[in-house]
Amino acid sequence: AAPTASSAAPSSPASAPTPAATAAAKATYSCPMHPEVQKDSPGSCPKCGMNLVKK
């Protein structure tokens, strides 16, 4: 039981904050007309050409 708890405890908290920190550190840009279009850098929507807005 101890090895399971010790192996689960470090991996779970270590993996959970990493994506959250990455998402918080990087802005997400999406198209106002096509919210499904999301990128991690500014640019234009591939569907309509509008500028992506920072979320």
Image (cartoon, grey):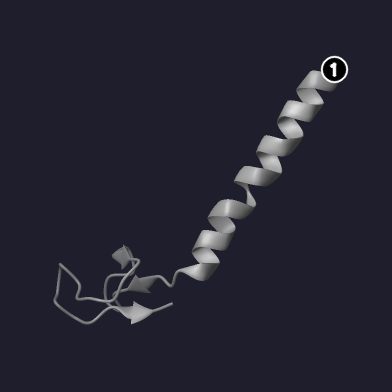
Q: Secondary structure at mark 1?
A: loop
Residue 4 relative to residue 38: left or right:
right
Residue 43 relative to residue 4: left or right:
left
* Residue 42 percent across, percent down from the top left: 28, 76
Quadrant of the drawing holding the C terminus = bottom left
The residue that appears at 32% across and 63% down in the rendered structure is 36
Q: Which residue is mark 1?
A: 1
* Residue 30 percent across, percent down from the top left: 33, 72
The residue that appears at 35% across and 66% down in the rendered structure is 40
Judge by depth and name the residue closer to the eye, 6 or 33. Answer: 6
In the depicted structure, whether residue 40 falls above or below residue 2: below
The residue that appears at 33% across and 69% down in the rendered structure is 35
Q: Identity of the amino acid at label 1?
A: Ala
Count of labels shown? Answer: 1
Q: Looking at the rendering, which quadrant does residue 49 occupy?
A: bottom left
* Residue 6 percent across, percent down from the top left: 79, 28
In the depicted structure, whether residue 23 falls above or below residue 50: above
In the depicted structure, whether residue 53 falls above or below residue 35: below
Residue 24 relative to residue 45: left or right:
right
Which residue, as the protein is rendered here, is positioned at the far top?
1
Quadrant of the drawing holding the N terminus = top right
In the depicted structure, whether residue 53 falls above or below residue 37: below
For the residue carrying disc 1, how many other residues have a C-alpha within 10 Å: few (<14), some (14-19), or many (20+)? few
Judge by depth and name the residue closer to the eye, 51 or 13. Answer: 13
Residue 47 relative to residue 41: left or right:
left
The residue that appears at 22% across and 76% down in the rendered structure is 43
